Image (cartoon, coloured by chain):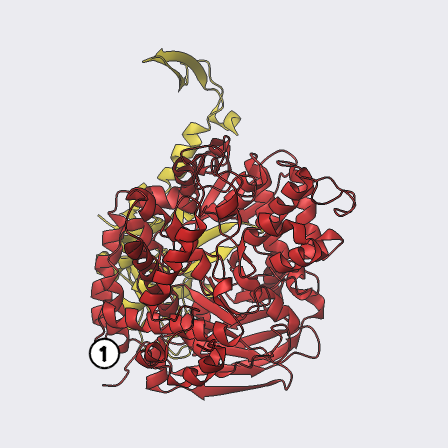
Chain colours: A yellow, B red
Amino acid sequence: MRKKLTVIPERCSGCRVCELVCAISHAGVNNPKKANIRVISLYPHPVIKMPVVCDQCKKPKCRDACPTDAIVVTDGVVTILEDRCISCHACVSACPIGAIFVHEDIETPFKCDMCGGNPKCVAACPKKAILYVPEHTLGQAHRLASALQYANMQEVEYFEHGEKKKLRYAEIETGGTRGDSR
Amino acid sequence: MSINGGYFMKVLHVDLSECKTHVEEVDEEFALKYIGGRGWGARLVWEHLKEDTDPLSPENIIVIAPGPLSGLYLPSSGKTSICSISPTTGIYGDSNIGGMFGVELRQAGFDAMVIKGKAPELSYLWIDDDDIQLKNAEKYAGMGSIETEHQLREDIGDETVKVASIGPAGEKMVKMACITADWGRNAGRTGMGAILGSKNLKAIAIRGTRDLPVADLKRLTRISDKAYKKLSRHNLFEFWQRQGLMSVIDYANTAGIIPTHNFKDTHFEEADKINGDVMELEYKIGDTACFGCPMACGNVNLVKDGKYAGTVIEGPEYETAAMFGSNVGVSDFSAILRANYLCDEYGIDTITAGSLISVMIEAYEKDLVTLEDLDGMALNWGDDESIMEMIRKIAFREGVGDTLAEGAYGVIERWPQLAPIINHVKGLDQSAYDARVAITMALGYATSDIGAHHARAWPVAKELEMGCNWDLNEKADLVIYHQTVRPLFDMLGVCRLPWIELGFDENTYAEFFSAAVGIEFTLEELLKRSNDVYNLTRAINIRLGLTRDDDRPPERVFNDPIKTGPHAGKVLDRDEFREILDIYYQRRGWDMDGIPTDETLKASGLEDAIEYMEPKRKAE
């Protein structure tokens, strides 16, 4: 089963512990600017914090952009082969989410390698904002939200142990099409 | 033994008048004797000290000092101390700030930065690793702190640049002006923003890329992996992330120490309208954390409807919620958020502002000031709109706000009749914990080196927990213990909350430090240095004219019994306070006038302070 990293921006506090553990384990130094993951914090317009990390695309644009075939996909991990890389940074510009990084001390661009299947950022995140999940579950959150937002839901109120509660349900044959829910 | 990490051993000196910078290499003795942060700051202030320097003159220096642990992989390593001679109190002042700013200064390759002089025009400092430039900031004149930060990032073209700035209040040298970074983290106390204003320095923007030096990174990682795990398993960990310091409202109200109506009372009937639950359920839209902090005590809040709709702010934490809630009689949480936003944007300290506004409300209630004194605007408990207007007037020094902008001393100078109702020590308004209920808290405020702030000692919880009837000697020792441990965190450049709130073992910090510098230190050795720094700040203050008479808690704690709540009727006894102060001096190794003895100074390695203390001693 192949797994992927995914992030939940709503949970992120912007503490950058993910950057620290990543930099220490990969670059061997205490320097968040050498991490393969970065937290972007925007405020006050808009208010959002989001860890940015490689999606390990199956048809990676970084690979397509590379003039020296230095980027390969091995076991689902997009990898930069340092000996082939000429450090032209074409991959850095090509990545749609900015998940390939550079630093003046390091010769070639660097990116997430998923720690060989045991990502340190996932274990270290104090807010559980970074998840490592089976690939086929990606999009699950949106599917769930979509179901919850369905417009033609009915409600019934009832009492349990003296407490008023509400149950929502979609009644058989009274709904419209899913398209009506938006 | 020599230092192998923890420090770059570099201090950046910026002379704004000459538009020059130079980098000073510090020696090992200095580094390890004063550790960093507030320790380095106090020593640099001492070395530059002249008795007649006006805090708001170009001659005064301001030190921005993260610590040797700032930015390292360990819990809550995002703290920075800002130290100087305070315009609020006229004595040593420091204030610490969280967020990411200090870490970025370290990543630029500096352990600390000293700023002196005055820029010829409103300017900002742009530190891009070792490329340092002073740039024109007229464009940002009068702009709020949060907006300045936003604009500067946009103009520099990098959203990851870290910015510390002052708002209009700092530019106008309002004596409660703060320095704001990372959108609402503040070095709030002792008027550090006014000093930047006096130097024509609107902001400091930093981008640093260097590795932080660590002697034994493997060891640090091993200890820290465990530390993070331990914190995350604490039963209050998730609750802490959800409510942060806002949970203190309920504690303080139940314990009967929450400031209510300018500390007339210590119990607020409507506390359940301004507590952590209200924030969490109705206003919170996100968490924020300082660098490396798993606890994420910062709460981002948004007012979604009503007259303050659209207000978004990181905060409040307990102090702000109490000072602009119960202390001014406000029970509308959205009004507290608005007050917090205005204070952050204008750049003033929420504790001092909340305190002085509550003083004016009480003064008006008791006819101690006239409507004319208030520029014709009535001020009443819970009247949020006039409170917002007062915040603006202070920040822009308009009318009565111009007097309040001078701080407690300024208000007393204009209206001496208000002296008994201003809760301050040495000119710094008291934080949001009452001192009548616990003599240790009164002693802590009275002997704090910067004035009435809880950063140095917060013994109130312990005293209440143990019942108040125990030996005065032990009580004095408790205060000294607090004043030694708590500032150590400010010297190391880390936050003390994991230790206070989640019971994290303070000995671990000696391990962090040992791993970082590559020399073994015990907690006791570090605490000794913290105590030495306390003697140093005392020596600074004595040189600046501080006397025993200044070591007294706010008048109210002796005069006005608490009205309601669990401690109704409680008031402190002057003779008992005199007695505990004697004991405190004796245990500190200070004479009965509060001046450190020669032996004490020698034991702290402060021989060079002895000659300055002699003239201050009274003839036998």
Rendered view: A12 above or below B203:
above
Q: Residue B61 occupies which quadrant of the picture?
A: bottom right
Looking at the image, can residue A53 be seen? no
Instruction: Return the residue nearer the eye: B312 or A113.
Output: B312
- List x then y, in percent, for residue A83: 30, 78
- List x then y, in percent, for residue B429: 54, 55
Q: Is residue A129 left or right of residue B98?
A: left
Q: Label 1: which residue?
A: B519
Element class at badge 1: loop
Identify which residue is drawn at 71% across, 56% down. B414
Rendered view: A133 above or below B107:
above
- List x then y, in percent, for residue A145: 42, 33
How many marks the image carries: the answer is 1
- List x then y, in percent, for residue B600: 33, 76
Identify which residue is drawn at 66% across, 46% down. B360
Q: Chain of mark 1?
A: B
Looking at the image, can residue A114 be seen? yes
Rendered view: B521 above or below B504:
below
Residue extending furthest toward the front: B620
Rendered view: B540 above or below A179:
below
Instruction: Return the residue nearer the eye: B433 or B504.
Output: B433
Instruction: Return the residue nearer the eye: B60 or B200.
Output: B60
